[in-house]
Image (spheres, helix red, strand yellow):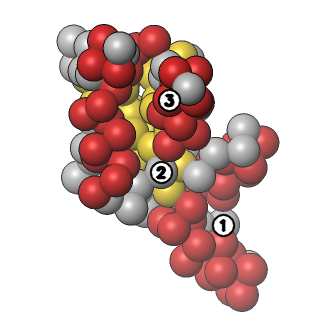
């Protein structure tokens, strides 16, 4: 039964995503509004070009508070080496990724474009349904 579960059935569809030129402090507010620990950064074609995490935002927020600076575009602070998961991948593959890395979520792609996001909570919720 577990082997038949696929990422696309448990991912969050229509995920929050940022453009590289989004102001980073605006992105921080959006992360709070959506209760997310991070979000993918996409180009105009919907291709994932980065990921902005809470950790990436901490330094920016500290500098903004201390120096009263606005921050800059997301592209200056995002992680560029982003691991994505294919929508058609078995959920077990995603769970193995979560167990082996510190990441809390992964962008989900189909045909090279962002189609969703899978979090640890999404994966755990899928497993709970099997109990």
**Left or right of 115, for residue 84:** left
**Quarter-wise, where is residue 12 in the image?**
top right
The residue that mark 1 highlights is 70
**Residue 30, position in %: x, y?**
70, 43
Q: Looking at the image, which is closer to me, 31 or 24?
A: 31
Question: Callout 2: 10 Å neighbours few (<14), some, many (20+)?
Answer: some
- CA gap, disc 2 and disc 1: 27 Å
**Left or right of 12, for residue 32:** right
Q: Residue at x 35, y 40 (%)?
A: 95
Most extreme residue toward the right, as rendered? 33
- CA gap, disc 3 and disc 1: 42 Å
Marks counted in the figure total 3
**Residue 97, position in %: x, y?**
28, 46
Residues at circles 3 and 1 in contact by the CB criterion of under 8 Å: no
**Quarter-wise, where is residue 57 in the image?**
bottom right
Question: Which of marks 1 and 3 precedes in the sequence?
Answer: 1
The residue that mark 2 highlights is 104
Residue 25 drawn above or below residue 118: below
The residue that mark 3 highlights is 127
Most extreme residue toward the front, as rendered? 131
**Left or right of 46, for residue 117:** right
Q: Looking at the image, which is closer to me, 100 or 117?
A: 100
Q: Which residue is drawn at 66% across and 54% down?
A: 28
- CA gap, disc 2 and disc 3: 16 Å
Q: What element carries label 1?
A: loop
Residues at circles 2 and 3 in contact by the CB criterion of under 8 Å: no
């Amino acid at each position: 039964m577990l082997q038949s579960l696929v990422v696309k059935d448990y991912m969050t569809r229509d995920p929050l995503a940022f453009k590289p030129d989004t102001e980073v402090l605006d992105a921080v507010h959006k992360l709070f509004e959506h209760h997310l620990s991070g979000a993918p950064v996409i180009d105009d074609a919907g291709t994932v070009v980065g990921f902005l995490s809470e950790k990436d935002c901490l330094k920016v927020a500290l500098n903004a508070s201390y120096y009263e600076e606005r921050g800059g575009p997301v592209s200056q602070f995002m992680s560029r080496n982003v691991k994505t998961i294919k929508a058609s991948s078995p959920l077990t593959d995603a769970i193995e990724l979560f167990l082996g890395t510190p990441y809390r979520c992964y962008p989900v792609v189909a045909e090279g474009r962002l189609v969703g996001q899978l979090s640890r909570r999404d994966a755990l919720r899928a497993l709970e349904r099997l109990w």
